Amino acid sequence: MRIVVADCSVDYAGRLSAHLPRAKRVLMLKNDGSILVHSDGGSYKPLNWMSPPCSHAQLELDETQTSAGIVEAWQVTHKKTADKLVVSLFEIFHDSAHDLGVDPGLIKDGVEAHLQELLADQIELAGDGHTLVRREYMTPIGPVDILAKDADGGSVAIEIKRRGGIDGVEQLTRYLELMNRDPKLAPVTGIFAAQEIKPQARTLAEDRGIRCLLLDYDAMRGMEDKNTLF
């Protein structure tokens, strides 16, 4: 990855046109060819960017550009749409390159992963007669934490969080929608399990027929049954 801090302007041309006037910005050029333009604000979202697949080229400056004070110009072109992003640099304050290597991807929170392991070992906490089918059951949009069977042999999908919010309920809802299309699994019910479940998330879950399971991490590690199923 190359990181450049520069006084620059940015012009985007393609399906839409956009112009960022001259200002100090951080430019991130990644090995996949993409570029992100950041300001000192706006949190994680860049002011402008070009996603891969794209190519990067340094432009030859003309007399108009040099007389305007431009010392360097880049053009990033999208390989499929031919959209172009041109960065005109007036002054470069920092320019460094770093080999970040292969990213291992997002690793699940340690407590969350341990909760999954503990609940798989103590699957009866999900209800009398429940049995474990497998952990990390893969769906077309990602793995649901636990797939189990209830006492009647019905499929149960369990999503586990440390703190259960609406996003987690929505995630489990998407899993259930896909899993219920599989005749080998359907009907599939859901359990939203967490150490803490926000009131709004509980309301949404109950409205969608999803049960909520409060997990006591310390009790589960001590094999004490202090968990409550609603």
Image (tube, helix red, strand yellow):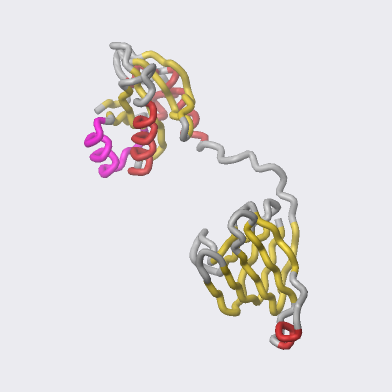
Residue depicted at 33% across the width and 20% down the height: 186
> Left or right: where does residue 53 sit relative to residue 99?
left
Residue 195 visible somewhere in the drawing: no
User: Which stretch appears magenta?
Assistant: 194-209
Query: Residue 119: x percent and y percent?
Result: 42, 23
Q: Is residue 103 magenta?
A: no
Query: Residue 60: x percent and y percent?
Result: 77, 74
Residue depicted at 54% across the width and 63% down the height: 46
Query: Residue 155: x percent and y percent?
Result: 35, 19
Query: Residue 27: x percent and y percent?
Result: 64, 65
Q: Quadrant for residue 21, please give it.
A: bottom right
Q: Furthest residue to the bottom?
A: 67
- Compared with 53, 225 (above or below) is above
Q: Is residue 208 magenta?
A: yes
Residue 200 visible somewhere in the drawing: yes
Q: Nearer the viewer, residue 118 or 222?
A: 118
> Left or right: where does residue 188 sit relative to residue 217?
left
- Compared with 19, 172 (above or below) is above
Q: Nearer the viewer, residue 209 or 193?
A: 209
